[in-house]
Image: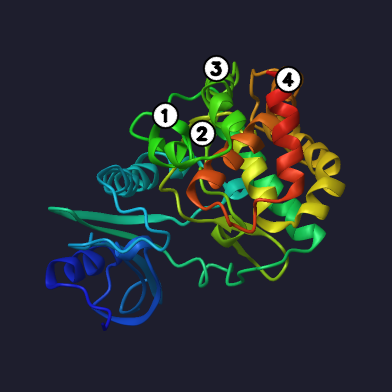
């Protein structure tokens, strides 16, 4: 099906950008389960040569790649696009160079359809996407996460998910019911409670996988996809990110160094922002919670997709150790 926008949404793009004409240059990707598309739109007569439009249009019948077709799944997705729009409209201006995100340009809604118009990060100097990262690129992503977490430390996530991340237990009852690892299933509520009762909370990205980071030629980084941004301890992002770009041997070998690097970035970011939060106290708590956060995602993954490549011996050993400690 060719990429299209109706006249009202086209008018919204032109009004937001000051352009005279637009053209859909490419469909960058389809949204998960057929919920819409992300478009690059070329512009004539405006200040920018192009923008990105995230056009959400829920299907009449969702086709989930792994078979999860439920009312809860639909409601979660629909809410996630509202949350993303709210993040860009009300929170994103506070994201400076340390945690660069696309500039927000426009938001339009009609019934269940949403149009979100954003800066084109390719045109802004972040045209690279990575499937594997160099040490410098990995460190840049850790710095981005630390900057985000420092920027929003102690904030109440108004208009966002009260509990960030797409896998947290309250929104994944179907996947928990499907989980056949009984010790992990029994431990899930305790693991969830320990994370939710963290003393130090911030905004977490909620889907901080490598695919959602955009790189410059000189290894600067920006991030996209804020559907699951909300409250939580920062190591939820950290554990998920590390698992998204390293294999099990690399995770085990590099875990200590990566944690050290992240907390170094966090201390610097808190200091640069003049934060009154005690970086040492945050580090003490979040280091303790890191393996618990890792196990929390492992719980979701084993219920959602038992054959997933991220389910490995390292995660299993870590989970067993966490469960034994509860």
Q: Is residue 76 above or below residue 43?
A: above
Residue 229 visible from this viewpoint: no
Dot placed on the residue nearer the N-terminal end, 3 or 4:
3
Q: Nearer the viewer, mark 4 or mark 2?
A: 4
Q: Give x and y (percent) for residue 73.
A: 32, 47
Spatial distance from mark 2 to mark 1, Cα to Cα? Answer: 7 Å
Q: Which residue is mark 4?
A: 325
Q: Nearer the viewer, mark 3 or mark 4?
A: 4
Label count reads 4
Q: Give x and y (percent) for residue 116.
A: 31, 58
Q: Which residue is mark 1?
A: 157
Spatial distance from mark 2 to mark 3, Cα to Cα? Answer: 15 Å
Q: Nearer the viewer, mark 1 or mark 4?
A: 4
The reply to whether the C-beta atoms of the residues labelled 1 and 3 are less than 8 Å apart is no
Q: Give x and y (percent) for residue 178.
A: 45, 42
Quick check: 122 left or right of 258? left
Q: Give x and y (percent) for residue 80.
A: 35, 46
Q: Secondary structure at mark 4?
A: helix
For label 1, count other residues whose C-alpha is less than 10 Å away and answer few (under 14), some (14-19) or many (20+).
many
Q: Looking at the image, which is closer to me, 215 or 304?
A: 304
Q: Is residue 278 above or below residue 109?
A: above
Q: Secondary structure at mark 1?
A: loop
Q: Residue at x 44, y 44 (%)?
A: 92
Dot placed on the residue nearer the N-terminal end, 2 or 1:
1
Quick check: 52 left or right of 139? left
Dot placed on the residue nearer the N-terminal end, 4 or 2:
2
Dot placed on the residue nearer the N-terminal end, 2 or 3:
3
What's the mark number on residue 197? 3
Dot placed on the residue nearer the N-terminal end, 1 or 4:
1
């Amino acid at each position: 099906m060719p990429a299209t926008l109706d006249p009202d949404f086209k008018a919204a793009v032109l009004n937001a950008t000051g352009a005279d004409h637009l053209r859909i240059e490419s469909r960058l990707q389809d949204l998960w389960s057929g919920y819409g598309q992300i478009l690059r739109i070329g512009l004539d007569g405006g200040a920018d040569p192009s923008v990105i439009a995230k056009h959400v249009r829920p299907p009449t019948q969702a086709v989930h790649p792994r078979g999860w077709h439920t009312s809860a799944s639909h409601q979660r997705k629909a809410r996630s696009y509202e949350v993303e729009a709210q993040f860009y409209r009300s929170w994103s201006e506070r994201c400076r160079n340390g945690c660069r995100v696309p500039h927000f340009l426009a938001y339009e809604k009609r019934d269940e359809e949403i149009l979100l118009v954003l800066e084109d990060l390719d045109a802004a100097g972040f045209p690279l996407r990575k499937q594997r990262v160099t040490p410098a690129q990995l460190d840049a992503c850790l710095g981005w996460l630390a900057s985000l977490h420092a920027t929003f430390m102690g904030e109440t996530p108004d208009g966002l998910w009260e509990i960030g991340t797409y896998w947290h237990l309250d929104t994944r009852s179907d996947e928990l019911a499907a989980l056949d690892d009984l010790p992990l299933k029994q431990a899930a509520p305790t693991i969830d409670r320990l994370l939710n009762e963290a003393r130090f909370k911030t905004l977490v990205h909620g889907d901080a996988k490598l695919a959602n980071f955009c790189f410059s030629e000189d290894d600067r980084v920006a991030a996209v996809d804020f559907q699951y941004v909300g409250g939580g301890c920062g190591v939820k992002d950290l554990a998920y990110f590390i698992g998204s770009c390293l294999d099990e041997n690399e995770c085990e070998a590099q875990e200590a160094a990566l944690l050290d690097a992240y907390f170094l970035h966090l201390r610097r970011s808190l200091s640069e922002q003049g934060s009154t939060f005690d970086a040492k106290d945050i580090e003490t708590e979040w280091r303790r919670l890191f393996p618990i956060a890792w196990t929390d995602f492992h719980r979701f993954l084993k219920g959602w997709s038992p054959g997933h490549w991220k389910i490995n011996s390292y995660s299993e050993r870590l989970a067993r150790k966490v469960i034994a400690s509860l």
